[in-house]
Image (spheres, helix red, strand yellow):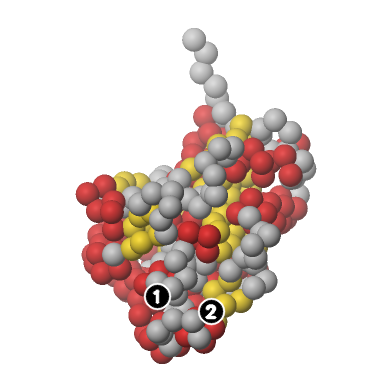
Amino acid sequence: MKVRQGSPGAKILALGHYQPSNVVTNDDLAATMETNDEWIQSRVGIKERRVALDSESEIDLAVQAGGKALAASGLAASDIDLVIVATCTLETQIPNASARVAVRLGIESPGAFDVNTACSGFCYALAVADNAIRTGSATNVLVIGTEKLSQWIDWTDRSTAVIFADGAGAAVVGPSQTPGIGPVVWGSAGDKAEAIMIKDRDSSLSQEGQTVFRWATTALHPVARQVCEAAGVDPADLAAFVPHQANLRIIEAIARKIGAENAVVAKDIVLAGNTSAASIPLALSRMVERGEVQSGGLALLLGFGAGLTYAGQVVEIP
């Protein structure tokens, strides 16, 4: 039996992101439910979020972000042989998102599958892309996190309506002579699965906020340190820390505990809300676009959320 030989390493070649144009402020929400700007900002740190139009699907968002990443990579659509979409908000489960995104981007006959680990989905998908390239199963991979959470939210429930939003982020991953994506550290806490859930097809997303907050602020900073150790990187040498944009208080708590005092910490949640699997690539792409981080620096990615699941890796910034 033959075994394929792949590239010595893989790296992110380019990033792209897309947000709907429709901005929903805290004052907008205060007009329809019992809340206000101060209450929302003090608890989750969000000032505004983007919400897709009824005519925009999570597939549309993914195509926009994926197309930008592909254009920035300098590769042609024909160079992509695997498409992975991380999402937990498809309106229907069949057909999957990845095959539909691929055909709209002109990518012919790629491997195509979806990953659903909710807010950690992009990091899971990125790890699979890295492994596929290093084992020779793929040459260039398009990885997209896309969510339309607005279609799964009860807009009268302030515990969720003030937090979640829509958007997409993407990365083109290709071969490299040296590793540009570090080993993944991933895991789960299934005993807490009901803390974030959609009970059935007729229900909206529900969340036990305090349970999630306690878990995130106590269990995840050791995971972040494990990720750095696996990559052989001192947290003090990180150029950026890009955690899932769940809650500003969670982000700041983890950042304080990992010893990454020189890193720029992504706080995209303030203006983008919690976009689940889209949040990490969206935040990293925006950081690069704004010139907050330099190409070649190291970024710690840390995804966590429903399941409860988590995953992280250190990556070289494209």
Is 291 rendered above or below residue 197? below
Residue 34 left/right relative to 67: left
> Camera-side residue: 97 or 303?
97
Is 277 rendered above or below residue 242? above
- Residue shown at 48%/59% (left/top)? 152
Secondary element at tag 1: helix
- Residue shown at 52%/29% (left/top)? 135
- Residue shown at 29%/64% (left/top)? 208
Picture coordinates of residue 76, whole percent (x, y): 77, 43
Crowd band around label 1 with a 10 angstrom C-alpha radius: few (<14), some (14–19), many (20+) = some
Q: Amino acid at mark 2?
A: Glu
Residue 232 left/right relative to 269: left
Q: Residue furthest front?
A: 202
> Camera-side residue: 138 or 259?
138
Residue highlighted by disc 1: 158
Q: Which mark is residue 48?
A: 2
- Residue shown at 64%/38% (left/top)? 99
Quarter holding the C terminus is bottom right
The quadrant holding residue 219 is bottom left
Is 235 rendered above or below residue 40? above
> Camera-side residue: 155 or 88?
155
